[in-house]
Image (tube, grey):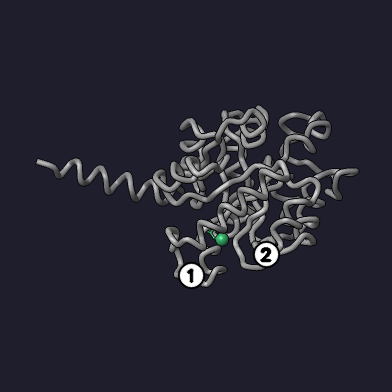
Amino acid sequence: MKNQIIEKWQSEEKSRGAWSNLPDIHIAETLARSGLDWICFDLQHGLMDYSHLTQLLPAITGLPITPVVRVAANQPDQIGKALDAGARGVIVPMINSAEDARQAVAACYYPPKGLRSCGPMRDAMVEGLSYLGSANEDIACLLMIETEEGLSNLEAIAAVPGVTGLFVGPMDLTYGLGLAPGDFSNDRFNAALQKIMQACRSNRLACGMFGYNAEMAAESLEQGFDFVSIGSDISMLRDGLAQALTTAKAE
Ligand code: 3PY
Ligand code: MG
């Protein structure tokens, strides 16, 4: 199955994903069977590490969903290992400059597009070496814009060849703008979102948004974002339980 973030964006369709914070293969499988387009395993803030990732990715192999990984930092070894474990893309946090963007791109792609070292463990097991022929087109290099510096260098970041898309981290972005955390209705926050979407449009990049819940995701899609997360395993468990309890208590 082709990378659904890339494929849907290229055919001008929206894609919807979920955030995986809990290192449990059954939760990952449940998310993967739910009709989502993509799932993001979070090695930055999620309660999981690389050894969990190597169990979670095989648990969803063959299911109709694109796995991506948010790496903990913009480090070539972290990006390479996430891709070697079977991720079809990375979300790289805290991108502040064109140099940061070039470093992330180089780590994502095999030569001549980048400098990724060759050792595709998981994909070679599943697909064999045909993976090497398709990896550079099928891997998404998604860069997070979530700091004041990243915002001020937005045009230079977006213009780096090889970037697939930009992805907004809304909570850090409110901090970066000097706003109260989570002040998503602030005009300056929304002006920043418009600026990011515009940079994506003019550089032919997919534009993504971290949504904390389905309402926020729907609003982001309405605003023009191309791919959004609609919640996390934790938030959906919590919100689903709260809703179920309310319904079960209703007279
Ligand atoms: C942010 O809101 O800053 C994020 O990175 C979402 O996880
Ligand atoms: Mg963030």
Residue under label 2: 152
Q: Residues within 10 Å of mark 1 (few under 14, many from 20)?
A: some
Q: Is residue 109 above or below residue 98?
A: above
Residue 85 visible within the image: no
Residue at 67% across / 67% down in the picture?
149
Camera-side residue: 93 or 156? 156
- Give coordinates of residue 142: x percent, y percent: 67, 48
Camera-side residue: 185 or 249? 185
Q: Is residue 87 above or below residue 173?
A: above
Rendered-image quadrant of the N terminus: top right
Q: Are marks 1 and 2 in contact (CB under 8 Å)?
A: no
**Amino acid type indicated by mark 2:** Ser
Question: Does dot 2 land on a helix, a strand or a loop?
Answer: helix
Distance in Å between CA atoms under marks 1 and 2: 16 Å
Kindly indicate the quadrant of the structure image that contains residue 10. Answer: top right
- Give coordinates of residue 189: x percent, y percent: 51, 60
Residue at the bottom extreme of this rendering = 178
Rendered-image quadrant of the C terminus: top left
Q: Which mark is residue 179?
A: 1
